[in-house]
């Protein structure tokens, strides 16, 4: 699963009469809207609860890249569930595009679940940047960069295991009040 821009080039598909030809990922949005086969699904648990979006996907040919036997390239399109004020002032849905190399007869639900895992990976990478200095490299060669990233990810794995094996005894889980709001007990230091 790979997030792609709307300008991702596709092997040119001939347009149907009175419908545009497809040369890039963004051109498929017209067909997705006309087809109107959006499914509302949860991408997974986020910081604000379940993340629901409308999803659809279309099989696409990529220029110069043939999928493996039994597999296909799909363009997974995610649409927000309501209209939003966009950066250019328009009010429209927000769209995101993902390129998926998946089994030819796979279900949309499996691709959506994997998109949710992708979000968790990005969150972990952000944590690694903050804790272990993953983004603090000044190297010019691939080998040096690879060594830095490997050391940073090993340090994050080590710290994660240490946190699980040795929890902070002063840190208590928050309790709930009668109103359902979290209450953090004060600890003395």
Image (cartoon, rainbow, N blue to C red):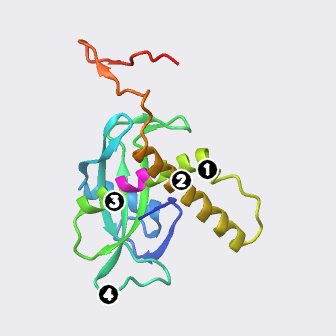
Q: Please provide percent x and percent y for residue 71.
A: 31, 80
> Pointers 4 and 1 in contact (CB under 8 A)?
no
Q: Report the front residue among 9 and 27.
A: 9
Q: Quadrant of residue 92?
A: top left
Disc 1 residue crowd, few under 14, some 14–19, many 20+, Cα 10 Å: some
Q: Residue at x 36, y 85 (%)?
A: 68
The answer to whether marks 3 and 2 mark residues whose Cβ atoms lie closer than 8 Å is no
Q: Earlier in the sequence, mark 4 or mark 1?
A: 4
Q: CA distance from mark 3 to mark 2?
A: 23 Å
The mark total stands at 4
Q: Earlier in the sequence, mark 4 or mark 3?
A: 4
* Quarter in which the N terminus is drawn: bottom left
Q: Which residue is denoted by mark 4 in the rendering?
A: 69
Which of discs 3 and 2 lies nearer the camera? The answer is: 2
Q: Nearer the viewer, residue 35 or 144?
A: 144
Q: Is residue 117 magenta?
A: yes
Residue of label 2: 156
Q: Which mark is residue 114?
A: 3
Q: Residue at x 27, y 14 (%)?
A: 177
Q: Main secondary structure of the magenta part?
A: helix
On residue 132, the disc is 1
Q: Are marks 3 and 1 in contact (CB under 8 Å)?
A: no
Q: Secondary structure at mark 3?
A: helix
Q: Is residue 55 left or right of residue 25?
A: left
- Element under disc 2: helix
- The picture places residue 187, in percent across and down from the top left corner, at 45, 18
Magenta part of the chain: 116-120
In depth, the one of 119 and 175 nearer the eye is 175
Front position among marks 3 and 1: 1
């Amino acid at each position: 699963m790979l997030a792609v821009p709307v300008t991702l080039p596709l092997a040119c598909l001939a347009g149907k009469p009175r419908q545009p030809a497809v040369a890039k990922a963004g051109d498929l949005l017209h067909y997705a809207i006309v087809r109107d086969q959006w499914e509302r699904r949860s991408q997974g648990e986020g910081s604000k609860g379940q993340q629901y979006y409308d999803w659809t996907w279309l099989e696409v040919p990529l220029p110069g890249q043939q999928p493996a036997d039994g597999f296909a390239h799909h363009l997974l399109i995610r649409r927000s569930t309501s209209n939003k004020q966009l950066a250019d002032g328009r009010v429209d849905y927000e769209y995101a595009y993902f390129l998926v190399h998946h089994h030819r007869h796979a279900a949309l639900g499996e691709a959506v679940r994997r998109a949710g895992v992708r979000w968790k990976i990005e969150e972990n990478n952000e944590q690694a940047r903050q804790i272990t200095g993953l983004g603090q490299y000044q190297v010019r060669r691939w080998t040096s960069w690879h060594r830095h990233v490997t050391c940073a990810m090993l340090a994050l794995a080590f710290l994660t295991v240490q946190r699980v094996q040795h929890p902070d005894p002063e840190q208590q889980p928050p309790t709930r009040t009668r109103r359902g709001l979290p209450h953090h007990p004060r600890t003395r230091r």
